Amino acid sequence: MEITEVRVKLVSNQDDRLKAFCSLTLDNEFVIRDIKIIEGSGGLFVAMPSRKMSDHCNRCGGKNHLRSKFCGTCGAKLDENRTPPDAQGRVKLHADIAHPINAKCRRKIQETVLAAFHEELERSKQPDYKPVDLDENSYHTHGTHA
């Protein structure tokens, strides 16, 4: 697998933990969008795209996010302890949509994405800077190449 392009869209509020959204192109053929660069307690890290976990109301069967206290369909109060914690005692609230399956791949993605992030930060200091458009469809001809 070759990372052939990384696009970085800086977040305007740099005081926030979320620093940027990214897209990653693999082998000039496959794009992964909604990758996030987040400032954690140990520094910057890459978070893969994820979705909020949900379950169904016991009363009406309506679908609700795990943090919901009331059903969005019928209004019934939902059990706040309806999801068991993991081995570290945390409730899993999000599930990755796409993710590396080994440490070597994760490291490669993280290093490449963070390098592109730092390059974009430097470019953003230029007076003629124009932010990257992550929704543009011509991924193989524009953006930052890895």
Image: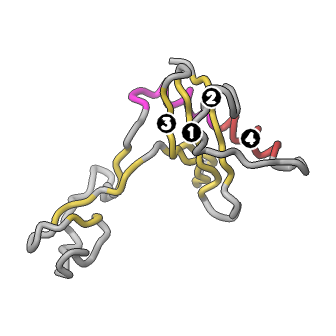
- Is 37 magenta? The answer is no
- Magenta extent: 100-113
User: In the rendered image, which residue does mark 1 sit on?
Assistant: 23
- Is 103 magenta? The answer is yes
**Between discs 1 and 2, the one toward the N terminus:** 2
Residue at image point 61% right, 32% down: 138
**Between discs 2 and 4, the one toward the N terminus:** 2
Q: Quadrant of the C terminus?
A: top right
Q: Nearer the viewer, residue 32 or 133?
A: 133
Q: Which residue appears farthest toward the front when viewing the image? A: 137
Q: Identify the mark at residue 32; answer none if there is no mark.
A: 3
Would you say the residues marked 2 and 3 are in contact, meaning their CB atoms lie under 8 Å apart?
Answer: no
User: In the rendered image, which residue does mark 2 sit on?
Assistant: 5
Q: Is residue 89 visible?
A: no
Amino acid on which the number 1 mark rests in the picture: Ser
**Crowding near pointer 2: few (<14 within 10 Å), some, many (20+)?**
many
Q: Secondary structure at mark 2?
A: strand
